[in-house]
Image: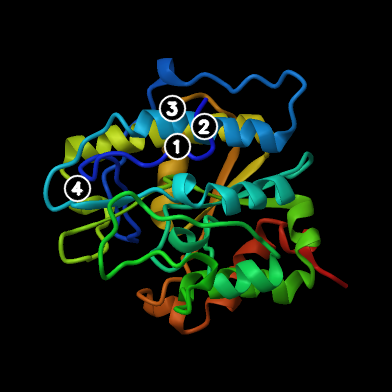
Amino acid sequence: MLDDNTPARDSGKLACGDGETELALCEADKEGFKPVPRMNTTPSSRFLQAELELNVLLRGLTFSDPVRYIYNPLEYAWDTHRCYVEKYCQGGQRILFLGMNPGPFGMAQTGVPFGEVKSVVDWLKITGEVGHPEDEHPKRRITGLACTQSEVSGARFWGFFRKLCGEPELFFRHCFVHNLCPLIFMSVSGKNLTPPELPAAERKALLGLCDIALCQVVQALGVSMVIGVGRVAEQQARRALSAAGVNVQVEGIMHPSPRNPQANKGWEDVAKTKLAELGVMSLLSNT
């Protein structure tokens, strides 16, 4: 297991993207999937263990052009991420909302999935120190919880559940939120790169490791439903969990990204309708 402050390594290693473009899915390595032992540990400690083990494996990957910078908030923002997990990952949660990977002004800054700063600080009440990637792009500085730029996807996602639940404790009584891949990567210009822009073999190696970690997380938490936020996350989760023989229901909701014209026309209404169909809305009402 890693030390909590283990830094990210070489800038040519690790990577994932933040796109909603459909990508070729790779099958999880069945032989590589080993459930995290339950023993007498808490759900949050099992969850964090799986993430730390994934960090070790991801450091063994290398990526070619156009990838130049790779950020892993599970390393430099481990303090705030651990605060989020230890505060809200608990026994009895039935639903796991799954994003694909961090955005530059969300989890990359805060260590929290869909982690728009205002939502993370004001509603989730996350505290802690955020450091810096070892190799930082001059146009993509990490300022942590002091970041003044809002991530629209995160503001929509957490804002919706804040409006619905009132207090975060009601949401997290039944649900948890996680990203399949903890990494964000970019080109020499600072452009955010998406998974389809990776060479196929490199993308397959990356997602293969993330798939195994997802299976470990799902079994460690004991959730009965995974809801992919966006088509890519839904399809990747469905393929990974099925290939590993993990018996869990996989569904999806529209991604709240401003790059999605449908989301800009009323993402909350679309999400509410889908979650009602899945029986989730009745769990989250604060009335």
Task: Please tell me in which quadrant of the rendered image residue 43 appears.
Answer: top right
Amino acid type, label 2: Asp
- Residue at x-position 73% and y-position 73%: 164
Q: Secondary structure at mark 4?
A: loop
Amino acid type, label 3: Ala
- The answer to which of marks 4 and 2 sits earlier in the sequence is 2
- Residue at x-position 32% and y-position 49%: 134
Q: Which label sits on residue 198?
A: 4
Q: Residues within 10 Å of mark 1 (few under 14, many from 20)?
A: some
Compute the Cα span from label 1 to label 4: 26 Å
Q: Position of residue 183 (x, y in %)?
A: 38, 48
Q: Are marks 2 and 3 in contact (CB under 8 Å)?
A: no
- Residue at x-position 72% and y-position 51%: 88
- Name the mark nearer the viewer: 1 or 4: 1
Compute the Cα span from label 4 to label 3: 23 Å
Q: Residues within 10 Å of mark 3 (few under 14, many from 20)?
A: some
Q: Which residue is mark 3?
A: 243
Q: Are marks 1 and 2 in contact (CB under 8 Å)?
A: yes
The relative height of residue 88 versus residue 171 in the rendered view (above or below) is: above
Q: Position of residue 146 (x, y in %)?
A: 52, 72
Visible residue check, residue 270: no
- The answer to which of marks 2 and 3 sits earlier in the sequence is 2
Q: Quadrant of the C terminus?
A: bottom right
- The answer to which of marks 4 and 3 sits earlier in the sequence is 4
Q: Which residue is mark 1?
A: 6
Q: Position of residue 63 (x, y in %)?
A: 19, 41
Q: Position of residue 111 (x, y in %)?
A: 52, 55
Q: Which label sits on residue 3?
A: 2
